[in-house]
């Protein structure tokens, strides 16, 4: 079964400290992974996707197929990074493919 | 460009009543999604439309939920009758052509928060 697991409900770090939001997945095929973010009183939006190999707002994520993980990392946290983060997996390439979301991790950056 | 619009933003009803939500996607977006997000969980796909056809409704509780996208533009999601466990945020999203979620970013609306008493 396809599943995305985010083991931490809440992660609190000090400003300037490194951040790592954990994401593990279960998928029988070749997955594509995403991170979505929801800032306070804003809409859910795409942060980054594995296929683009991009760094957005200082965040990066590496797909580790051996550990079935897609952890989100940032070397130095900023207060504006406080938000809800969702890891997500895409089930395929067809027009019927859909995104499966994890339960989310609330990141709180302390000043 | 204007984003995905949803209304109402909040709705409180009693169990066994009916409720309807409306979504207007970004202009030109062929694919429209309805998600249910229960408190403490991630969004769960209820139904996906490609233009005015249903692509996936495998997780839609069809005994009480229905959705339509007439004319392939805006969409309505209805619950009849509502149960306590339907309390959630209902999110609408749209994407350009739906040829794989991988290449098409989903843009989300603000959501409708439903409380069933």
Image (cartoon, helix red, strand yellow):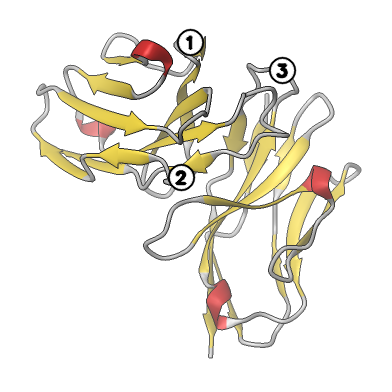
**Residue that label 2 marks:** B41
Same chain letter for marks 2 and 3? no
Quadrant hosting residue A42: bottom left
Residue B111 shown left or right of residue A89 in the figure = left
Residue B81 shown left or right of residue A107 in the figure = left
Which disc, if any, is residue B54? 1
Q: Nearer the viewer, residue A100 or B103?
A: B103
Output the chain of dot 2: B
Output the chain of dot 1: B
Q: Is residue B51 above or below residue A63?
A: above
Mark 2 and mark 3: Cα distance apart in space: 26 Å
Helix, strand or loop at label 2? It is: loop
Q: Is residue B33 above or below residue B37?
A: above
**Residue that label 3 marks:** A94
Q: Nearer the viewer, residue B115 or B109?
A: B109
Same chain letter for marks 1 and 2? yes
Residue neighbourhood size for the residue with mark 3, other residues' Cα within 10 Å, grouped as few (<14), some (14–19), many (≥20): few
In the rendered image, the quadrant that contains the N terminus of chain A is top right
Output the chain of dot 3: A
Quadrant hosting residue B95: top right
Mark 1 and mark 2: Cα distance apart in space: 25 Å
Q: Is residue B96 above or below residue A74?
A: above
Quadrant hosting residue A41: bottom left
Helix, strand or loop at label 3? It is: loop
x 49%, y 15%: residue: B51
Query: Where residue B26 sits: x, y (%)?
Result: 46, 36
């Amino acid at each position: 079964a396809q599943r995305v697991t985010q083991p931490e409900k809440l992660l609190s770090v000090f400003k300037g400290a490194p951040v790592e939001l954990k994401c593990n997945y279960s998928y029988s095929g070749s997955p594509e992974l995403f991170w979505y973010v929801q800032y306070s009183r804003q809409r859910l939006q795409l942060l980054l996707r594995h296929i683009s190999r991009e760094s957005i707002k200082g965040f990066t994520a590496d797909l580790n197929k051996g550990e079935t993980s897609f952890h989100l990392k940032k070397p130095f946290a900023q207060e504006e990074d406080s938000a809800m983060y969702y890891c997500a997996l895409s089930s395929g390439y067809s027009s019927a493919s859909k995104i499966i979301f994890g339960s989310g991790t609330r990141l709180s950056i302390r000043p | 460009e204007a984003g995905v619009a949803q209304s109402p933003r909040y709705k409180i009803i009693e169990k066994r009543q009916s409720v309807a939500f409306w979504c207007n996607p970004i202009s030109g977006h062929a694919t429209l999604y309805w998600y249910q997000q229960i408190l403490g969980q991630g969004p769960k796909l209820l139904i996906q439309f490609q233009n005015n056809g249903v692509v996936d409704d495998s997780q839609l509780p069809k005994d009480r939920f229905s959705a339509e996208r007439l004319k392939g533009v805006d969409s309505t999601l209805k619950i009849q009758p509502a149960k306590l466990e339907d309390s959630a945020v209902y999110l609408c999203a749209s994407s350009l052509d739906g040829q794989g979620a991988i290449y098409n970013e989903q843009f989300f609306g603000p959501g409708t928060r439903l409380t069933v008493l």
